[in-house]
Image (cartoon, helix red, strand yellow):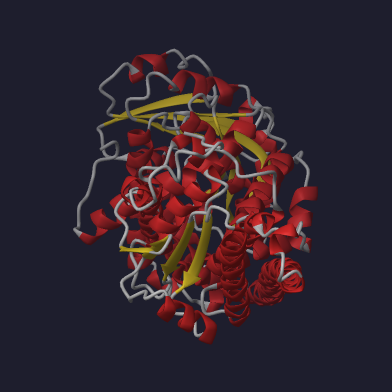
């Protein structure tokens, strides 16, 4: 019987060690795969962001070149807002997967915020220079620091409005992002710390209760003129 | 630390356990067990069928025993009526004319007393037990006997499946039992079994007499006997192609009652009378892996259940809050074509999927090595989606019973 115990113990030990090795390989492979996928997401985000940078810089340059007659430019930033929204959605998802403290996510968010600010400025300048009707713009300030219970709800409601009314220009900013340009932007727009905060065509509002209440903040007819409603 | 992170050690342990099963399945002793064919030796065997109010099924059980491919003069079938109050005695009487059938009637004293009375009444070399709601394949006994070839083997278990599963719960149990076929086959090869189930487990009579017969053992006499055999240094083997089919509860309440009895029996036996086996190096795989993992599984099953419920409720509340006021047409409309970027793959999900897939592989292996006929697809589906939600119910009930010292009746 002692011989059997030793044999069984030896086999048990051997199999346990092999099983431990397999488990470590499995867990390692899973961790590697998840990391690989997240890196691929970051790479894609960077690629989109690079393209957006080029597009906005191009628009900016065209605007400068044709300073005398900016409205003759065939360039328009209206197509960029769609890309910005796409980028924002992806960035938000990647932030959920990687965490808001991830350095790459923070770097991408900083770049994204700069692109948004630049697009916002160019849009306003174009509208002013060409005398066109100013598009309805929403500046949305949120926080992921756990101090904004209604930010998720507000973000989803804005996504709905943006998808439903494609002419609406929504710019989302992480209020706590440590970025000089963003801090200046917040100061210029006189946004206080109560979040979520909205600036709809210059009009401020704070907090989120419902979609209907948010819609009331929009200028009369701004949403009704839409053609892409899914309502 | 997030709640999700709490689950990682348990998932790691489960993966390790499954890896161990896989490695041992491919090891020499398990391969040798699979290569073992039915034997020609026909030692004397007595099969005891303890009955308490089993009028509905005992006839079919007895008929399946009479159909066993084994010489009638070497096989005794002992039907023990343990004080039934239904038509069981009358049904049993129909088999009285068979020379190999013997009927014993006694006052109700519990399953262990019925088994002991049966054992005391025979001189057979090997004793088999068959619950009166179970049915065997004709070649099952010839698969069992060769497993006793070595003198240190004191007991042999069979390969159990659910008899004619009909409800979703029965299909789920069938998949679980089929998983158990792989599990028993693998751990028997390293002498790691701690239960010799009621349906068609066999014992060497001399060992039973040496160890002192069956005990009440918190209504899990089959588990207690197996633990006693292990503690005494004997071995428990498994015959993976000795197929036996057993009736299983068709309702959730029936299933919870049955499993509560099993789980309380496990906790009371293993953490009580047989605590010394946990961590015992002498008992190798049983002491160092099987019993500790089984104990942890009870606790982790409850913990993971509560974490899952908490996370589900939290996610549901968040989803309802976020989507409040938004038209359903928007919420449920896909946002563009498939995009790999949004595939919700994370570490926890992949670990859980790997664990589940491995379990499913073991179910298919169990079906294959036992050569059990029938389809298992519905069982696999119900096992995948139901088991994780229903198993914690009996784990909770059993833990509460043990904690508060509550004892329930056999069918209560």
Horizontal side of A223 relative to B377 (left or right) equals left
**Does residue B238 lie above or below A24 as drawn?**
above
**Does residue A110 lie above or below A97 as drawn?**
below
Residue B173 appears in view: no
Which residue is at a point 54% across and 56% down the rendered structure image? Answer: A169
The answer to which image quadrant residue B351 occupies is bottom right
Q: Foreground residue, B244 or A67?
A: A67
Q: Quadrant of the C terminus of chain B?
A: top left
The answer to which image quadrant residue A175 occupies is bottom left
Q: Quadrant of the N terminus of chain B?
A: bottom left
Residue A49 in percent (x, y) is at 70, 69
Horizontal side of A121 relative to A156 (left or right) equals right
Horizontal side of B83 relative to B50 (left or right) equals left
Which residue is at a point 52% across and 56% down the rendered structure image? Answer: A134
Q: In the displayed image of the protein, which residue is found farthest to the front?
A: A68
Q: Foreground residue, A13 or B244?
A: A13
Residue B332 appears in view: yes
């Amino acid at each position: 019987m002692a011989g059997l115990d030793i044999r069984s113990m030896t086999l048990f030990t051997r199999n346990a060690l092999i099983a431990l090795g397999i488990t470590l390989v499995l867990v390692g492979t899973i961790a590697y795969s998840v990391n690989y996928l997240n890196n691929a997401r970051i790479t894609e985000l960077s690629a989109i962001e690079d393209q957006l940078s080029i597009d906005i810089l191009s628009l900016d340059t065209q605007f400068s070149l044709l300073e005398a007659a900016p409205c003759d430019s065939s360039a328009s930033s209206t197509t960029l807002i769609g890309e910005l929204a796409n980028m924002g959605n992806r960035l938000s998802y990647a932030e959920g997967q990687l965490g808001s403290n991830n350095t790459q996510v923070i770097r991408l968010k900083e770049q994204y915020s700069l692109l948004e600010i630049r697009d916002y400025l160019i849009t306003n300048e174009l509208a002013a220079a060409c005398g066109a009707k100013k598009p309805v713009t929403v500046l949305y300030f949120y926080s992921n620091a756990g101090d904004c219970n209604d930010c998720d709800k507000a973000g989803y409601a804005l996504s709905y409005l943006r998808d439903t009314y494609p002419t609406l220009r929504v710019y989302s900013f992480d209020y706590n992002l440590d970025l000089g340009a963003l801090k200046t932007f917040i100061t210029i727009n006189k946004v206080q710390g109560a979040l979520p905060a909205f600036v709809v065509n210059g009009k401020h509002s704070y907090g989120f209760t419902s979609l209907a209440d948010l819609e009331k903040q929009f200028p009369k007819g701004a949403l009704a003129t839409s053609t892409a409603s899914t309502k | 630390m997030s709640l999700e992170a709490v689950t990682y050690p348990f998932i790691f342990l489960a993966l390790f356990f499954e890896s161990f099963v896989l490695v041992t399945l491919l090891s020499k002793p398990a391969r040798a067990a699979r290569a073992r064919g039915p034997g020609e030796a026909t030692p004397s065997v007595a099969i005891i069928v303890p009955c308490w109010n089993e009028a509905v099924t005992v006839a079919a059980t007895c008929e399946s025993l009479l159909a066993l491919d084994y010489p009638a003069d070497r096989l005794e079938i002992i039907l023990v009526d343990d004080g039934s109050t239904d038509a069981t005695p009358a049904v049993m009487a129909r088999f009285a004319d068979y020379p190999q059938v013997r009927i014993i009637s006694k006052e109700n004293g519990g399953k262990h007393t019925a088994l002991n009375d049966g054992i005391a009444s025979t001189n057979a070399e090997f004793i088999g037990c068959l619950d009166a709601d179970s049915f065997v394949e004709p070649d099952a006994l010839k698969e069992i006997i060769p497993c006793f070839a070595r003198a240190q083997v004191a007991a042999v278990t069979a390969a159990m499946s659910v008899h004619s599963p009909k409800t979703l719960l029965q299909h789920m149990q069938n998949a679980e039992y089929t998983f158990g076929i792989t599990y028993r086959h693998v751990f028997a090869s390293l002498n790691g079994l701690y239960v010799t189930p009621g349906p068609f487990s066999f014992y060497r009579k001399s060992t039973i007499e040496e160890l002192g017969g069956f005990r009440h053992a918190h209504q899990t006499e089959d588990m207690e006997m197996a633990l006693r055999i292990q503690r005494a240094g004997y071995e428990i083997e498994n015959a993976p192609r000795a197929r036996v089919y057993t009736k299983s509860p068709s309702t959730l309440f029936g299933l919870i009652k049955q499993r509560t009895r099993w789980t309380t029996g496990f906790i009371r036996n293993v953490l009580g009378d047989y605590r010394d086996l946990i961590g015992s190096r002498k008992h190798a795989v049983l002491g160092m892996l099987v019993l500790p993992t089984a104990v942890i599984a009870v606790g982790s099953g409850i913990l993971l259940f509560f974490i899952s419920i908490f996370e589900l409720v939290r996610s549901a509340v968040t989803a309802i809050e976020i989507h409040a006021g938004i038209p359903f047409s928007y919420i449920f409309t896909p946002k563009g074509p498939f995009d790999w970027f949004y595939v919700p793959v994370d570490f926890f999900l992949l670990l859980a999927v790997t664990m589940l897939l491995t379990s499913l592989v073991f179910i298919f292996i169990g079906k294959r090595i036992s050569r059990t006929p029938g389809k298992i697809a519905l069982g696999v589906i119900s096992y995948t989606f139901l088991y994780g939600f229903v198993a914690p119910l009996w784990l909770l009930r059993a833990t509460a019973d043990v904690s508060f010292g509550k004892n329930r009746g056999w069918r209560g």
